[in-house]
């Protein structure tokens, strides 16, 4: 009985190590995941989301007294985006802090 439990222990941790290796290769070597990015868009050419501007620094349009901006959400595979772009986007997202629905730059 002790030998069977030892074999089960070895098989379990071998399988766990194998799965961790596959995950490492997929994410860090092949970059097999998607990145969600926000991009400005032109509502005359494509369907866009609308967001009310909270600060004066953003690219806002003044329509009937309301400051809004148009954007779309895109998903791109990480393997086709240069690593420099990924680092810049991650850094900018980390710099924004939302408190009670308002964005503040850190």
Image: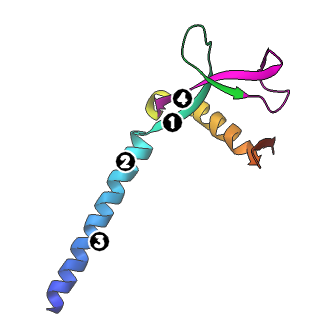
Q: How far apart are the alpha carbons under marks 1 and 2?
A: 18 Å
Q: Which residues are magenta?
A: 52-77
Q: Nearer the viewer, mark 1 or mark 3?
A: 1
Residue 13: mark: 3
| Residue 47 horizontal side relative to residue 61, left or right | left
| Residue 29 horizontal side relative to residue 71, left or right | left
Whether the magenta-drawn stretch holds residue 60 is answered as: yes
Q: Element type at marker 3?
A: helix
- Which of the two discs, 1 and 4, labels the residue nearer the N terminus? 1
User: What residue lies at 58% left-to-right and 20% top-to-bottom?
Assistant: 48
Magenta residues, dominant SS class: strand
Residue 81 in the image: state x and y as whole percent: 51, 28
Quarter residue 17 falls in = bottom left
Q: Given contact means CB atoms under 8 Å apart, are the residues at marks 4 and 2 in contact? A: no
Residue 42 in the image: state x and y as whole percent: 62, 12
Residue 25: mark: 2
């Amino acid at each position: 009985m002790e030998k069977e439990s030892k074999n089960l222990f070895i098989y379990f941790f071998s399988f766990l190590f194998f799965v961790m290796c596959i995950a490492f290769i997929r994410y860090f070597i092949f970059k097999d995941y998607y990145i969600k990015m926000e991009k400005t868009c032109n509502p005359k050419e494509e369907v866009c989301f609308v967001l009310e501007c909270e600060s004066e620094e953003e690219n806002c349009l003044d329509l009937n007294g309301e400051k809004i901006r148009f954007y779309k959400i895109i998903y791109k595979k990480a393997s086709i985006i240069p690593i420099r772009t990924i680092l810049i986007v991650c850094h900018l997202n980390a710099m924004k802090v939302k408190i009670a629905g308002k964005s503040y730059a850190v």
